[in-house]
């Protein structure tokens, strides 16, 4: 029995998500020729980057793709050979290995003009993105998120808001243009629409049996990170939401 | 003297101990026992101890191969004895619990702002988010100003802030023709003979 047999059959909508992500990586191969590129962590505020027309790459997702294609051992060896310990995060080790060796299952990764990390995912990203900043010699924006135990206090929100505001001039300088308010409003509108759909999908997983597995959730989160603010992302989450409403038709 | 002033005076004496370390009649082991007492002694008690130690400084020249140590903490502390026995002499350190705690005096009249200034302007530390270049420049400065012949990265296992920076720090040192060694230890275990052998081999090449 192969390990593939241990998982549920693929969902009908998986092909749509895979196509969206594949198209995004394909676009990435030529992104450096057509505009500015930002590498971002999952959950980092990307709306102002989107509104400035940055192409966004999500290295954690890239590392997951390397894992799915069974290329992690080969790629992360390049990082280990350069002195990166096996004890550090394997996502980071894989992406640093890809950065040093140029090996990737997606053909080619665009180089970043800007790095944006937020500690709302983990503290490791601070150290990981400092390595990227040192290697690529590009500006690094860190959005520090305070711990929230029950509810976010006003000063915690103000703390994050001010960091985002201070990040905008840095991103504008890299982009070579000013942030257009109207453009930002539209990106935020699409971003909110996609997030609400994604939350609805995740909440549906409280049902027994759950309409999608945790593995599907991990795979489906790529668009909400690097394509948040795109109309196509809203469409794909709407399609997933619609399918989770009729769980019997989920399996293709 | 208020609380801030007492702490600042204690840290000033701590910095003086670091600066005059080669003139003090102590082994590296005893020197680190002395400076690490700043971690737990009340500021005024430490000032008294430090001033008594500084009074013993003399124009002496200690032998041994001069090295800089970098890492989080020199534990287990018998690593310091091993380095001495193997012919090394620690002339400066970049330990998070030692050299990176040389906080400068603050300038603000607001005590909290003053404390914040002191932390922010302390020597570069990966746990505080300094860039790798700032850390490298600081290490190169320590090596050059103390005429060290090499750097020993004495790392605690699984410590990500340190492990992420290591390859670029070593590369930068190598480009400046400064040899370095990485030793990874578990601070709950006694110092292994393997570590001792690696330290010996490194000191031999220096």
Image: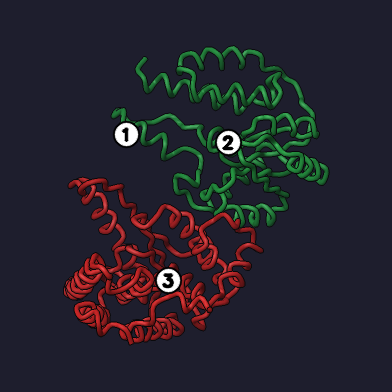
Left or right of residue B163: residue A145 = left
The disc placed on residue A61 is 3
Evaluate whether label 1 is on the same chain as label 3: no
Task: Identify the residue under disc 1.
Answer: B113
Q: Position of residue B162 (x, y in %)?
A: 55, 48
The local crowd at label 3, few if under 14, some if 14 to 19, many if 20 or more residues have their Cα within 10 Å, is many
Q: Nearer the viewer, mark 2 or mark 1?
A: 2
Left or right of residue B49: residue A174 = left
Q: Earlier in the sequence, mark 2 or mark 1?
A: 2
Query: Residue at left 34%, top 63%?
Result: A170
Front residue (pair A59, B101): A59
Chain A: colour as depicted: red
Q: Secondary structure at mark 1?
A: helix
Query: Residue at left 68%, top 25%?
Result: B29
Task: Identify the residue under disc 2.
Answer: B73
Chain B: colour as depicted: green
Q: Position of residue A54 (x, y in %)?
A: 34, 75
């Amino acid at each position: 029995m192969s390990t593939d047999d241990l998982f549920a059959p693929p969902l009908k909508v998986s092909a749509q998500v895979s196509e969206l992500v594949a198209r995004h990586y394909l676009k990435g191969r030529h992104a450096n020729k057509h505009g500015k590129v930002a590498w971002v962590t999952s959950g980092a505020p990307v709306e102002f980057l989107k509104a400035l027309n940055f192409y966004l790459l999500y290295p954690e997702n890239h590392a997951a793709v390397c894992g799915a294609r069974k290329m992690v051992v080969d790629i992360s060896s390049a990082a280990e050979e350069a002195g990166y310990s096996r004890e550090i995060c394997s996502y980071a080790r894989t992406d640093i290995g890809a950065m040093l060796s140029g090996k990737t299952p997606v053909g080619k990764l665009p180089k970043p003009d800007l790095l944006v990390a937020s500690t709302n995912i983990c503290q490791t990203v601070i150290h990981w993105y400092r390595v990227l900043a040192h290697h690529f010699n590009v500006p690094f924006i860190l959005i520090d998120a305070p711990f929230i135990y029950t509810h976010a206090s006003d000063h915690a929100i103000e703390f994050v808001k001010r960091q985002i505001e201070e990040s905008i001039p840095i991103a504008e300088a890299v982009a070579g243009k000013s942030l257009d308010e109207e453009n930002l409003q539209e990106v935020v509108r699409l971003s909110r629409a996609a997030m609400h759909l994604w939350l609805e999908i995740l909440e549906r997983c409280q049902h027994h049996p759950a309409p999608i597995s945790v593995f599907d959730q991990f795979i489906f989160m790529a668009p909400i990170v690097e394509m948040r603010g795109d109309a196509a992302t809203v469409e794909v989450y709407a399609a997933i939401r619609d399918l989770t409403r009729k769980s019997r038709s989920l399996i293709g | 003297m208020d609380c801030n002033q007492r702490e600042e005076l204690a840290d000033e004496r701590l910095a003086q101990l670091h600066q005059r370390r080669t003139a003090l009649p102590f082994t590296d082991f005893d020197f680190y026992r002395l400076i690490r007492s700043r971690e737990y002694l009340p500021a005024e008690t430490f000032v008294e101890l430090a001033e008594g130690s500084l009074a013993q400084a003399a124009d002496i020249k200690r032998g041994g191969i001069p090295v800089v140590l970098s890492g989080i903490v020199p534990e287990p502390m018998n690593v310091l004895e091993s380095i001495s026995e193997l012919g090394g002499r620690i002339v400066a350190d970049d330990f998070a619990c030692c050299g990176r705690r040389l906080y400068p005096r603050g300038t603000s009249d607001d005590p909290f702002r003053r404390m914040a200034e002191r932390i922010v302007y302390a020597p570069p530390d990966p746990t505080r988010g300094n860039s790798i270049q700032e850390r490298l420049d600081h290490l190169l400065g320590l090596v050059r100003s103390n005429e060290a012949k090499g750097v020993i990265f004495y790392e605690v296992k699984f410590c990500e802030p340190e492990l992420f920076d290591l390859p670029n720090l070593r590369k930068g040192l190598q480009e400046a023709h400064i040899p370095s060694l990485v030793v990874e230890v578990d601070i709950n275990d006694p110092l292994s003979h393997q570590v001792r052998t690696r330290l010996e081999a490194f000191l031999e090449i220096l």
